Amino acid sequence: MSQETLFLDSGQNQEAVPERKSRSRLGLVITGVVGGSLVALYAVTAPFVAPALRKICLPFVPATTAQVENVLGVLRTRSGTLVDIGSGDGRIVIAAAKHGFVASGFELNPWLVWYSRYKAWREGVHRSTSFHISDLWKVSFAQYSNVVIFGVPQMMDQLELKLTSELPSTAKVVACRFPFPTWVPEHTAGEGIDTVWVYDAKTFKSHLQHGTTTKTAEQEDTQDSHT
């Protein structure tokens, strides 16, 4: 092999090295982008999918305009603190703040909480709103005088007990999409999926107290009959 041939082969090899490095870097970039996209996709979708794996599923379904209007309508004579249990993208909390409430939202999905905070800031109500990443079963709602809940039937009976034990007697509870199983609503508004049910804490707390008193009296009668 001549020196000229060796020189040409050496030059070609030297030109190929940067090309291979460039392709390698491009491959790493593509791998990183794809991997990052998958991680981001998982991070966004996991909080939506995860509830399906829990005993009680509380999926994110945005409130309709009619639902928001109905909630604000039944609370139009109310004021003070308001909490939206499962606040989603924050639209109920933000709308309530615009009507004078000091409003809070509790939501498990961190992406929705961050979005809600940004949206509240953009709408100019960030000073009268707060959003928390938290499980509703680990939070006390004793400080709130108005409660809004977009629940599912599987959780409503347990939530009845929780709210009955925690809320002050002056509180109002607004249930959207599904009513509570044993509470008697004070009144309703809207129709179909936009229906909201309004409950007076004084009523459902007194019913619980009456039921407890009746049960205690029956137990005493039973004990007396055995003596």
Image (cartoon, rainbow, N blue to C red):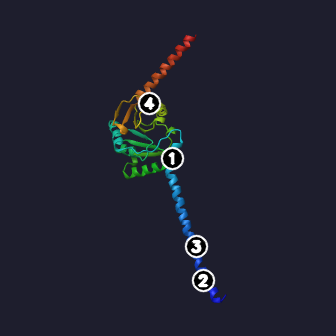
Q: Nearer the viewer, residue 227 or 18?
A: 18
Give the quadrant of the N terminus: bottom right
Residue where numbered disc 4 is placed: 181
Question: Mark 3 belongs to which amino acid?
Answer: Lys
Position above or below: 218 against 184 = above
Tell me if mark 1 has few (under 14), some (14-19) or many (20+) residues whose alpha carbon lies within 10 angstroms of its own. Answer: few
Residue contact between numbered discs 2 and 4, judged by CB atoms under 8 Å:
no
- Dot 2 falls on a residue whose secondary structure is helix
Mark 4–mark 1 distance (CA, rounded to whole Å): 27 Å
Mark 3–mark 4 distance (CA, rounded to whole Å): 67 Å
Return the x and y of residue 187 as percentages of the image width and height: 35, 31
Residue contact between numbered discs 2 and 1, judged by CB atoms under 8 Å:
no
Mark 2–mark 4 distance (CA, rounded to whole Å): 82 Å
Q: Earlier in the sequence, mark 3 or mark 4?
A: 3
- Dot 3 falls on a residue whose secondary structure is helix
Residue where numbered disc 1 is placed: 49
Residue where numbered disc 3 is placed: 21
Residue where numbered disc 2 is placed: 11
Position above or below: 161 against 221 = below
Q: Earlier in the sequence, mark 2 or mark 1?
A: 2
Task: Tell me the residue at 53%/59% (across/down).
Answer: 36
Question: Mark 2 belongs to which amino acid?
Answer: Gly
Mark 2–mark 1 distance (CA, rounded to whole Å): 56 Å
Q: Earlier in the sequence, mark 4 or mark 1?
A: 1
Residue 79, can we see it?
no
Return the x and y of residue 205 as percentages of the image width and height: 44, 27
Return the x and y of residue 156 as percentages of the image width and height: 46, 34
| Numbered disc in front, either 2 or 4 | 2
